[in-house]
Image (cartoon, grey):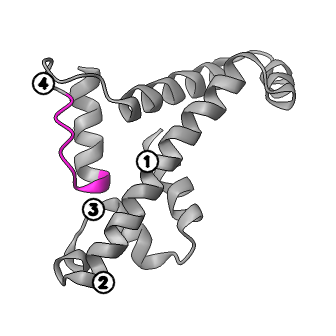
């Protein structure tokens, strides 16, 4: 079910088919990182003492270090997708007609890093 959900998210957000739901395909580093970031974000929200996760984040240890690394992987992959989408938009007219979430963010926000952050926050 997790693979299917991730595939739907990628289709809606990036207009790409990851085919993660096919069990014969190897695990995706993006899917694994996305799943880990989602799980750790939920654990952070459930924490009865926010001071603990804030201290871990400050010291860059434990689950906060893993969360930071997972988000970095997702950021890097999405930045690659933004670069690819920009190349598509400059070389073809079909890049301008896409209606996925990434294209919408790119059309309304000039800063690519801000687009990545918004996209990751929407999906996590």
User: Label 1: which residue?
Assistant: 77
User: Label 2: which residue?
Assistant: 90
Q: Which SS does the magenta portion mostly show?
A: loop
Tell which tag, 3 or 2, sits nearer the viewer. Answer: 2
Residue 22 — which label? 4
Stretch of the chain drawn in magenta: 13-20
Q: Nearer the viewer, residue 72 or 106?
A: 72
Tell which tag, 3 or 4, sits nearer the viewer. Answer: 4
Tell which circle, 1 or 3, labels the residue nearer the N-terminal end.
1
Residues under numbered marks 1 and 3 in contact, where contact means CB atoms less than 8 Å apart: no
Counting from the top left corner in percent of width and height, residue 41 is at 59, 28
Secondary structure, mark 3, is: loop
Residue 22 position (above or below residue 113): above
User: Label 3 vs label 4: CA separation?
Assistant: 23 Å
Residue 43 — which label? none
Tell which circle, 2 or 4, labels the residue nearer the N-terminal end.
4
Q: Is residue 14 left or right of residue 67?
A: left
User: Label 3: which residue?
Assistant: 100
Tell which circle, 2 or 1, labels the residue nearer the N-terminal end.
1
Tell which circle, 3 or 4, labels the residue nearer the N-terminal end.
4
Q: Is residue 59 left or right of residue 53?
A: right
User: Label 1 vs label 3: CA separation?
Assistant: 16 Å
Secondary structure, mark 1, is: helix
Number of residues whose C-alpha sits closer than 10 Å to that of mark 1, classed few (under 14), some (14–19) or many (20 or more): some
């Amino acid at each position: 079910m997790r693979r299917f959900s991730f595939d739907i998210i990628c289709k809606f957000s990036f207009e790409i088919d990851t085919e993660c739901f096919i069990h014969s395909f190897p695990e995706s580093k993006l899917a694994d990182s996305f799943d880990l970031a989602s799980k750790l974000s939920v654990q952070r929200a459930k924490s009865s003492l926010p001071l603990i996760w804030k201290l871990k984040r400050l010291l860059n240890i434990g689950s906060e270090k893993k969360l930071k690394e997972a988000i970095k992987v997702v950021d890097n992959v999405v930045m690659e997708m933004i670069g690819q989408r920009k190349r598509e938009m400059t070389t073809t007219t079909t890049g301008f007609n896409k209606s996925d979430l990434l294209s919408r963010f790119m059309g309304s926000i000039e800063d690519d890093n801000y687009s990545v952050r918004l996209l990751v926050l929407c999906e996590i």
